[in-house]
Image: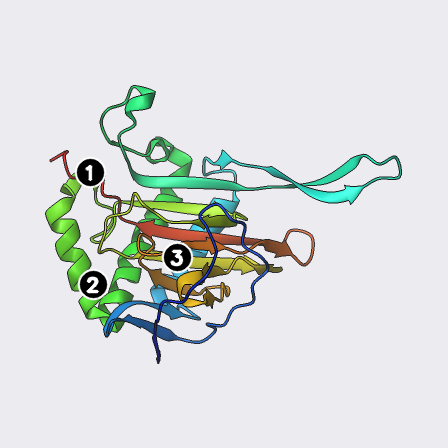
């Protein structure tokens, strides 16, 4: 794998800013170092059982068997001949499985397991995602054993077993056609990485960009990004279908810090 030593750069990007149509400058298998220590990596193509499970999970996500939270949005497309705004409706949705943090403002001061787990038709999706999670953990263990061991230690010490998803995570979210303005995942467990697996068909964009390092990672179909999302401001570039039905999904595994007090 190519080694890239990350060096912080000056920039003016703030949380909430929109990502432009940035082209990827990380397009091959790469391991990222900061201060001489590996903190993540990018694989252009997953393979074997991991790819098989991801293909199953993606097909299930695209079906009507898996509950979704719809987040359709309107994209301005100019004006018509009468001067009225024209919009295109972009279909977006997400599904969360695994553990859900406490939400006192919603009168639920305790964590829970996603309600999707109680939906019979979603069982295949959940099983495929869980198996994909374990396979992704094995990839991390093979390519970056220090990341695996550190995260295993942090999660084991911080997260009660009932709230773990796999060995290294608490939760998973699958996003359909969702780009993201610049943000930082402040709810994530520090010292832990996210896994982001991309499924893409007849679409471009959807690249993860980290302005602190001027790094934009290619969101190739069946690629896998391992990245500490709590560490830096980052965003996802616009997803642009290049023909009808084009999409980009991201299947994500992450560890949240809000379960420490619920042993």
| Mark 3 lies on residue | 196
| Disc 2 to disc 3: CB gap under 8 Å | no
Question: Quadrant where the N terminus lies?
Answer: bottom left
Sooner in the amino-acid sequence: mark 1 or mark 2: 2
Element at label 1: loop
Comparing 123 with 72, the one in front is 72
Q: Nearer the viewer, residue 36 or 179?
A: 36
Which residue, given by chain and number where applicable, does mark 1 sit on? 259
Q: For this view, does 97 lie left or right of residue 200?
A: left
Alpha carbon separation for disc pair 1 and 2: 20 Å
Q: Position of residue 4 (x, y in %)?
A: 35, 76
Residue 57 drawn above or below residue 27: above
Give the Cα distance between marks 3 and 1: 22 Å
Residue 123, compared with residue 222, is above or below; it is above
In the image, farthest residue toward the bottom: 2
**10 Å crowding of disc 1: few (<14), some (14-19), many (20+):** many
Name the residue located 36 percent from the left edge and 67 percent from the top edge.
8
Instruction: Please name the residue that numbered disc 2 is placed on.
Output: 148
Whichever of callouts 2 and 3 sits on the residue coming sooner in the sequence is: 2
Quadrant containing the C terminus in the rendered view:
top left
Q: Is residue 31 above or below residue 167?
A: below
Could you tell whether 91 is left or right of 211 in the image? right
- Measured from the top left, where is residue 58 in percent x and y? 46, 52
* Residue at screen point 14% across, 35% down: 261
Residue 60 visible from this viewpoint: no
Which residue is located at x 69 percent, y 56 percent?
243
Tag 3 secondary structure: strand
- Which mark, residue 49? none
């Amino acid at each position: 794998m190519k080694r890239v030593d990350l060096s912080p750069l000056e920039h003016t990007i703030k949380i909430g800013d929109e990502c432009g149509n940035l082209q990827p400058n990380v397009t091959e298998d790469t391991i990222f170092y900061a201060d001489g220590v590996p903190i993540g990596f990018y694989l252009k193509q997953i393979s074997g059982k991991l790819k098989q499970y991801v293909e199953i999970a993606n097909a299930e996500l695209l079906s009507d068997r898996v509950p979704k939270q719809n987040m359709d949005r309107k994209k301005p497309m100019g004006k018509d001949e009468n001067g009225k705004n024209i919009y295109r409706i972009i279909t977006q949705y997400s599904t969360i499985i695994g553990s859900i943090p406490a939400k006192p403002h919603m009168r639920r001061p305790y964590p829970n397991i996603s309600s999707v787990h109680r939906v019979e038709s979603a069982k295949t999706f959940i099983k495929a995602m869980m198996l994909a999670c374990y396979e992704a953990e094995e990839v991390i263990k093979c390519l970056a054993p220090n990341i695996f061991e550190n995260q295993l230690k942090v999660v084991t010490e911080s997260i009660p077993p009932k709230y773990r998803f796999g060995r290294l995570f608490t939760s998973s979210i699958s996003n359909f056609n969702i780009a993201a303005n610049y943000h930082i995942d402040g709810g994530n467990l520090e010292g832990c990485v996210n896994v982001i697996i991309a499924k893409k068909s007849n679409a471009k964009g959807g690249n993860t960009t980290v302005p602190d390092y001027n790094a934009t990672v290619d969101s190739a179909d069946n690629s896998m990004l391992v990245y500490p999302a709590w560490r830096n401001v980052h965003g996802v570039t616009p997803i642009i279908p290049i023909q009808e039905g084009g999409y980009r999904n991201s299947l994500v595994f992450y560890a949240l810090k809000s379960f420490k007090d619920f042993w």
